[in-house]
Image: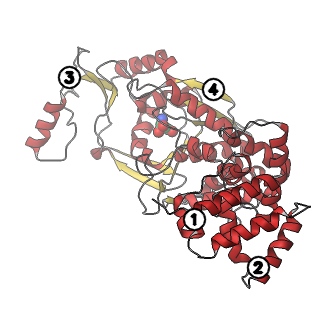
Amino acid sequence: MKSTLRVRFAPSPTGYFHVGGARTALYNWLIARKAGGSFILRIEDTDDSRNAEEWVEGIVSALTWLGINWDEGPYRQSERSELYSKAVERLIVEGKAYWCDCTREEVDQRAKERGGAPGYDGFCRDASKQNSPGSALRFKIPRPGQTVVHDKVRGDVVFDHGNLDDFIIVKSNGSPLFVLANVVDDIDMGISFILRAEEHLPTTPKAILLFQALGAEELPIFAHVPVLVNAKRQKLSKRRDRVAVEDYREMGYLAPAVVNYLALLGWSPGDDREFLDIDEMIELFDIDQVNHSPAYFDEQKMQHFNGVYIRELLADEFVNYCLPFLEKNDWWVGNVKQLETFSRVAPLVQERVSLLGEAAEMIGFLFRAEVEIPLELVDSVLRKDIKAAQIIKDVGEIYRGLQRFTAEELHDVTRAYCESIETPLRKLQAPLRVALTGSKVGPPLFESIELLGKETTLKRLSLASELIGTPSQ
Ligand code: GLU
């Protein structure tokens, strides 16, 4: 039998899709999938001044990438205004809302005179005012009273109505406020479980009062999941931290690694296990185990997860995942020869990267016509050792005489040369690698040299020794 559990993810399209939003979506999705319920996507786009179509597309594309699919939607609040108007009508008729034409200055002035907390004092509550230009509709908070939010994560949270203002539900321009549209939709869509970010908890008593005022038969279950913080324990912010899911996608994260990491921000399966596939997450996820303390979003740890997921890919999969990243470079034409070279080097790269984007960086030297050696490396690696110039020259000569240009052969002759000059092989690796690839890191050296081929190798070694001989500017 299909479960009646209905959850929704209800983002406001006001910016890049945030990792915190992705975590909220994921938890909702896990709950729905576990219970065989429905996951609904609802775009809360009532705030015209802050919404943009590109952000809606960003949300849809990020959720799709993450594999968080929806059973209904995306619904858009901007297309549902009739429903909100009806609800507003009902609240007015039933005396549960009233028009207020106080300006902000008036409200502030009276608060000052009272000497109490700022906020609306209920000035128009019993004045039976009509809707006139500039007036807003306020919800009449039942007084006295209190509302208890039974929260699955935070336990019971009590709100005294004495601390709640008669809040605005329709702005003076006629548009419904977030909390009204949100509740009207939750009722209309039969949402039975609301899981959302902790920042919404202070609004929840207002939402509950609206549910009741609008005659909802049953309240949904509420769960407010903890905020995400950075290393300094500050709430993640788009100004300070990298928070856009899109950025991570572009850096070369694999969606399953991101999903796995996000699932652990506030939840753990209860043992020391951290790596879970999606089916295990669905099976094990339990809202009762979600912690209420802030969850540290540790980008380095997520990157580590990504490395583990990259290493688990089949060789072919890794190649395919890398292709879009290779295609961003002007040195990549994607012909058969390049593809063949890349396929050969790919398993060596796969072991060494934690982002797909790094893979492209690491192998560019194989495809670029020339390598550019950063000045910093010329000084710190090539010129550091007085012998490096001589070594590069000698090695070039030795390589020139090679018949078989294979990694094994290259390794053997280079080692023999090292013995002859009584220098450990590892000391040669850095200058050789820098001379040939322009970088200190990359796939194993001799395999790289084999792939580079004799002609290019000799050319680059000779250019590097010239460079060492030329004084830096
Ligand atoms: N639209 C709200 C937001 O993006 C979400 C509200 C909710 O989940 O109830 O923060």
In this figure, which residue is indicated by the disc labeled 4?
73
Q: Which mark is residue 101?
A: 3
Q: CA distance from mark 4 to mark 2?
A: 67 Å
Return the residue nearer the eye: 142 or 84.
Answer: 84
Location of mark 1 (residue): 469
Which label's residue is closer to the chain start, 2 or 1? 2
The verdict on label 3 being within 8 Å of ligand 1 is no
- Give me the C-alpha separation between circle 2 and circle 1: 22 Å
Q: From the image, state whether disc 2 or disc 1 is nearer to you.
A: 1
Left or right of 55 on screen, residue 334: right
Local secondary structure at mark 3 = loop
**Mark 4 vs mark 2: which is more N-terminal?**
4
- Circle 2 crowding by C-alpha within 10 Å: few under 14, some 14–19, many from 20: some
> Cα distance, mark 3 to mark 2?
88 Å
Secondary structure found at label 1: helix
- Rendering coords of residue 332 (x, y %): 71, 39
Residue 276 appears in the rendering: no
Q: Point out the frontmost of discs 1 and 3.
A: 1
Q: Identity of the amino acid at label 4?
A: Gly
Q: CA distance from mark 4 to mark 1?
A: 66 Å
Q: Position of residue 186 (x, y in %)?
A: 53, 31
Q: Tag 1: residue type? A: Gly
Name above or below for residue 83 compared with residue 149.
above
Dot 2 falls on a residue whose secondary structure is: helix
> Residue 284, how many percent across, how many down?
72, 56
Which numbered dot is residue 418?
Answer: 2
